[in-house]
Image (spheres, rainbow, N blue to C red):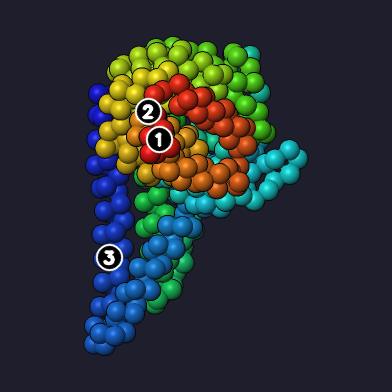
Amino acid sequence: MKQKKQGRAGYFASIAIYFLIGALSGLTILQFIDAAQLWRTPGKMLAWFLILIGVMYVGMVVEIAVHEAGHLFFGLITGYRFCSYRIFSLMWIREGERVVFRRFAIAGTGGQCLMAPPEPDEEGRIPFVLYNLGGVIFNAVTAVLFLIPALLLPSTSAAAVFFRMLVIVALGFALANGIPMRIGEVDNDGANTRALLREPDAVPVFRVMMLINEASSRGVRVKDMPGEWFREPDERLFDNSIGVSAEVFRLGRLMDEGQYREAEGQIARFLTRDTATNGIYRNLLTADLITCLLIRGDRESAGTLRTKELKRFLSVMRASPSAVRTEIAMARLIDGDESGAAAHEQRFEKIAASYPYPAEIEAEREILAAVAAAGEKIPGANQDEEK
């Protein structure tokens, strides 16, 4: 219920902001066409219209890069350590003492900058406002910088129109990320900052999650990380994405440890609770629950969880090792489709070859081994082979 309310409000707010970006951009284009009397030559008018639409989309790409650079800049000046910087599928990640280039994309995100936190103060606090809002600040700053030439250049010039379009896009990004809301399935920077300000006890949890990300980038398995990082969060923290994320990490550690029966029970209980869990986490947990049920041999219960929503999610998350692992498990142990499972396995190996977190691949291979072992115990699980 909490997730649905937050998601619905954020959805309409984000639609309004992006509609505003489009409307203002369209108005700017029409004003330029009228001022330059381009309507007299339809071919020229169409060409300029397409060029200016292209400027808008280029501006969006630029602002994504600027946004993530803002997180990086303010993170560095407040004591954070660089882990990774990604724009679409272009990713730079620290491996040991080197920063290397990788290709990696996460569905539903244009970019991401991950950093490791500084040492906490005596009360266990760390600076978080500038780091979390750094992208918003950079978007706002670029809007101001673009505004200067937009005002100084002749108002009817193409250059002035270019900069006006960039101002609109930059300002739109600042609003979309700064106004607290859930966009799609993900809380934006403003929502995360508000959650940390409202609930100080979430700050140490936020720090631990960044430490987990840092350890993962260094190739450390979740099961080998310090146990105190995976304590169950206080129940009141489940009202925000910080606490929910921490619980998802904790449940994921049970999977990495091979405690599938324990993970099954705890995931099932968590999914019935009224929390601020977004759709991405809910589906990832459901996928893990299906895997646990299948390893235990309960195909019937696992089959009831394979909804249309989950199928769509797994299709979108095609680059996620855990999503592909779940598809392998369902094909082999629910459908008895060995050829389908083999196709998914080929995709898994393709992902594994370039995946930037090798420890996660190692963990998924162990889960797949448990799935294979379960298949040998289930009569009829490999129907293709029997045929």
Q: Is residue 339 visible?
A: yes
Residue at the front extreme of this rendering: 387
What distance separates the C-alpha of mark 1 from that of mark 3? 62 Å
For marks 3 and 2, give the CA distance: 60 Å
Q: Is residue 136 left or right of residue 299?
A: right
Residue 284 figure quarter: top left
Q: Residue 274 at what x, y percent from top left?
A: 29, 18
Measured as percent of width and height from the top left, residue 258 is found at: 54, 19
Q: Are marks 1 and 3 in contact (CB under 8 Å)?
A: no
The residue pinned by badge 2 equals 380
Q: CA distance from mark 2 to mark 1?
A: 8 Å
User: Could you tell me if residue 10 is visible in this image?
Assistant: no
User: Does 163 sit above or below residue 280?
Assistant: below
Left or right position of 318 against 84: left
- In the rendered image, the vertical position of residue 185 relative to residue 66, given as above or below: above
Q: Residue 184: x, y in percent?
A: 33, 40
Mark with earlier residue (3, 2): 3
Residue that appears at 46% across and 12% down: 262
Q: Amino acid at mark 2?
A: Gly
The structure residue drawn at horizontal position 35% and vertical position 14%, both measured from the top left corner, is: 269
Q: In which image quadrant can residue 299 be found?
A: top left
Which badge, 2 or 1, comes first in the chain's sequence? 2
Q: Residues within 10 Å of mark 3 (few under 14, many from 20)?
A: some
Check disc 3 and report the residue beneath it: 26
Image coordinates for residue 50, horizontal then vertical, percent = 34, 73
